[in-house]
Image (spheres, rainbow, N blue to C red):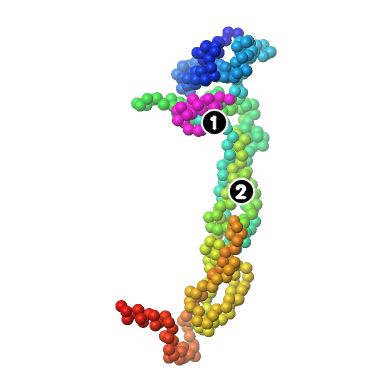
């Protein structure tokens, strides 16, 4: 075995502190990263650095190495395997080197972390009545499901991607007039997962997910209003790298009712009445959301008068407390009268109808001008 000394590789002495090891690796890894370095042997050099760091940054392994040298990690398989550092997690120190110090933001080096699947938003049209009372609706949506054949990996025989060394991103040096800086892009070899597979899954063609049409039962709660969103957890797109599923959001659009006008949890209803009903008063059967009721309209009721029907509005979608209903009187002036009705109205017109308060007040204000 003709292997270079780990301390030599990192350019440090045998009693270097943990911080010195880390800082030496940081400096050399930055210079020798194969995506940055112009040195044709950069990849081999980078591997060497990784190996040295993986050993010396681990107290136990460092001790073994100090005692036995390279033979500490040479197994019983002919002594050629050397130290296997493929399981070592470099993501923290790499994000340190290629992340924060170059301002790449938080995604640097963490491309293969579990990520929650995307949320899905769908729109649902409802009749006024279904929105008021709630309903159960079955819908069909297309969502990405984790592939069962490869458990979302996209293939079998996982290996660390050699192009990005498992980081999922490629760092490139850009030279400009202002100097050189590093840019980071998703690795095209592994699509950012950091791993490649011997055999691509034939069911999902390596994607790890499959588009599936799913039937979902939506329980629309009573009282939903236009634009309200209902969240159904875990019914969105499949997660990435074993992350949880996204959520499904259902946004409601509600048809107008020919009679009732909704204002929050309250409803308004216009009640047309005749002039004689307005003058003489009457009892009227009117509809509410909860069946018919009798409304007593007193003599002399004006057009636009409001009658409050407490608790006859819509149940609040959160508190379930019911709103109110307002019956608004609309006095309809007849535009077609028969001969006899005309005669009656003419006779009525001869009486002093202008004795009403409102006429007196109006006259007074005119004189004041
Ligand atoms: Zn698959
Ligand atoms: Zn890659």
Q: Helix, strand or loop at disc 1?
A: loop
Locate residue 346, reporting x and y percent.
44, 90
Image position, residue 65 (x, y; %): 61, 13
Quarter of the rendering containing residue 7: top right
Q: Are marks 2 and 1 in contact (CB under 8 Å)?
A: no
Range of residues picked out in magenta: 89-107
Give residue 297's position: percent from left, percent from top: 55, 78
Magenta includes 93? yes
Write down the residue under mark 2.
Answer: 232
Report the residue marked by disc 1.
110
Residue 351 vertical position relative to residue 116 in the rendered view, above or below: below
Tell me the quarter of the image containing the N terminus.
top right
Return the x and y of residue 303 as percentages of the image width and height. 48, 76
Which residue shows up at 51% across the image and 13% down it? 12
Q: Residue at x 58, y 52 (%)?
A: 230
Quadrant where the C terminus sits is: bottom left
Q: Residues within 10 Å of mark 2 (few under 14, many from 20)?
A: some
Residue at 50% from the left image edge and 79% from the top image edge: 301
As measured in the structure, the alpha-carbon distance from the residue carrying label 2 to the one carrying label 1 is 28 Å
**Tag 2's secondary structure?**
strand
Horizontal placement of 96 versus 176: left or right? right
Left of 48 or right of it: where is 363? Answer: left
Ranked by sequence position, the earlier of labels 2 and 1 is: 1
Can residue 223 be seen? no
Which residue is nearer to you in this view: 62 or 79? 62
Q: Give the residue furthest to the left.
A: 369
Say which of 354 and 177 sits in front: 354
Question: For the view shown, which residue lies furthest in the right direction?
Answer: 76
Magenta span: helix, strand or loop, mainly? helix
């Amino acid at each position: 075995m003709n292997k270079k000394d780990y301390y030599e590789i990192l350019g440090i002495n045998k009693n270097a502190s943990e911080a010195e090891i880390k800082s030496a690796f940081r400096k050399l890894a930055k210079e020798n990263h194969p995506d940055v370095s112009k040195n044709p042997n950069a990849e081999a050099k980078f591997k060497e650095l990784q190996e040295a760091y993986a050993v010396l940054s681990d107290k136990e392994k460092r001790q073994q190495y100090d005692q036995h040298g390279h033979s500490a990690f040479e197994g019983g398989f002919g002594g050629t395997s050397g130290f296997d550092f493929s399981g070592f997690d470099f993501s923290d120190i790499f994000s340190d080197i290629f992340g924060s110090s170059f301002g790449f933001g938080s995604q640097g080096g963490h491309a293969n972390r579990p990520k929650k699947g995307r949320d899905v938003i769908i729109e649902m049209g409802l009749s006024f009545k279904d929105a008021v009372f709630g309903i159960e609706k079955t819908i069909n949506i297309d969502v990405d499901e984790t592939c069962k054949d490869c458990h979302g990996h996209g293939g079998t025989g996982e290996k660390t991607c050699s192009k990005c060394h498992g980081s999922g991103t490629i760092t490139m040096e850009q030279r400009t007039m202002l100097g050189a800086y590093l840019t980071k892009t998703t690795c095209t070899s592994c699509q950012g997962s950091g791993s490649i597979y011997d055999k691509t899954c034939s069911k999902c063609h390596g994607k790890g997910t499959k588009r599936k049409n799913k039937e979902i039962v939506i329980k629309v709660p009573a009282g939903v209003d236009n634009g309200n969103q209902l969240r159904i957890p875990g019914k969105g797109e499949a997660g990435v790298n074993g992350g949880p599923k996204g959520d499904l959001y259902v946004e409601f659009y509600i048809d107008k009712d020919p009679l009732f006008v909704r204002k929050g949890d309250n409803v308004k209803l216009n009640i047309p009445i005749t002039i004689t009903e307005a003058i003489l008063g009457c009892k009227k059967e009117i509809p509410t959301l909860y069946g018919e009721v009798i409304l007593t309209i007193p003599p002399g009721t004006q057009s636009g008068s409001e009658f409050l029907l407490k608790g006859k509005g819509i149940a609040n979608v959160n508190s379930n407390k019911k709103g109110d209903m307002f019956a608004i009187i609309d006095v309809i002036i007849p535009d077609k009268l028969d001969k006899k009705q005309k005669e009656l109205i003419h006779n009525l017109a001869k009486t002093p109808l202008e004795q009403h308060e409102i006429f007196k007040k109006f006259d007074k204000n005119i004189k004041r001008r």
